[in-house]
Image (cartoon, rainbow, N blue to C red):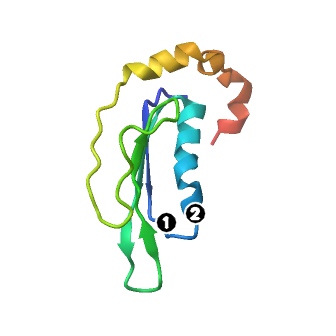
């Protein structure tokens, strides 16, 4: 509602807990909100316990498409992508959901 164009979702989630939804969760949010998502997940094994973090960080565009490849599932790396910020306006103009939203209709839901 405040004009976000990219949202970063840092995570430290281990294999088996939610790895199966990692590749659909952020693309769905990007499509629903028509912005980019930077999905960051830790890699490696925690020395205490049996947490094996699955990595696979990525960027996804406002259409829910991956921008470049996903990160490695086993080794830390820096993911850098060029993002076409003009694509946000293109998607928002094409789909009327963003344009026709009615924030005034849900004021009570967003009050603190």
Residue bearing mark 2: 18
Quadrant in the picture for the N terminus = top right
| CA distance separating discs 1 and 2 | 7 Å
Q: Nearer the viewer, residue 94 or 105?
A: 94
Q: Residue furthest bottom?
A: 48
State the image quarter where residue 111 is shown.
Answer: top right
Q: Residue furthest top?
A: 93
Q: Nearer the viewer, residue 99 or 24?
A: 24
State the image quarter where residue 52 is shown.
Answer: bottom left
Residue bearing mark 1: 13
Q: List x then y, in percent, for residue 91.
A: 51, 20
Name above or below for residue 34 compared with residue 9: above
Name above or below for residue 61 compared with residue 89: below
- Residue at position x 46%, y 85% from top? 49
- Residue at position x 35%, y 54% from top? 71
Q: List x then y, in percent, for residue 74.
A: 35, 67
Quadrant in the picture for the C terminus = top right
Q: The residue tagged with tag 1: helix, strand or loop?
A: loop
Mark 1 surroundings within 10 Å by alpha-carbon count, few (fewer than 14), some (14 through 19), many (20 or more)? some
- Residue at position x 38%, y 77% from top? 45
- Residue at position x 40%, y 47% from top? 58
Name above or below for residue 54 compared with residue 101: below
Mark toward the start of the polypeptide (1 vs 2): 1
Q: Is residue 92 left or right of residue 97?
A: left
Mark 2 surroundings within 10 Å by alpha-carbon count, few (fewer than 14), some (14 through 19), many (20 or more)? few
State the image quarter where residue 53 is shown.
Answer: bottom left
Q: Is residue 36 left or right of residue 99?
A: left
Q: How many marks?
A: 2
Q: The residue tagged with tag 2: helix, strand or loop?
A: loop
Q: List x then y, in percent, for residue 100.
A: 65, 15
Mark 1 near mark 2, Cβ–Cβ under 8 Å?
yes
């Amino acid at each position: 509602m405040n004009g976000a164009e990219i949202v970063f979702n840092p995570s430290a989630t281990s294999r088996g807990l939610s790895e199966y939804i990692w590749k659909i969760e952020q693309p769905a949010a990007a499509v629903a909100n028509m912005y980019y998502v930077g999905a960051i997940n830790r890699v490696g094994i925690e020395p205490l316990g049996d947490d094996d973090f699955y990595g696979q960080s990525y960027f996804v565009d406002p259409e829910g498409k991956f921008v470049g490849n996903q990160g490695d599932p086993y080794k830390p790396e820096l993911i850098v992508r060029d993002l076409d910020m003009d694509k946000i306006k293109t998607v928002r103009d094409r789909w009327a959901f963003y344009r026709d939203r009615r924030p005034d209709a849900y004021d009570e839901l967003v009050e603190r």
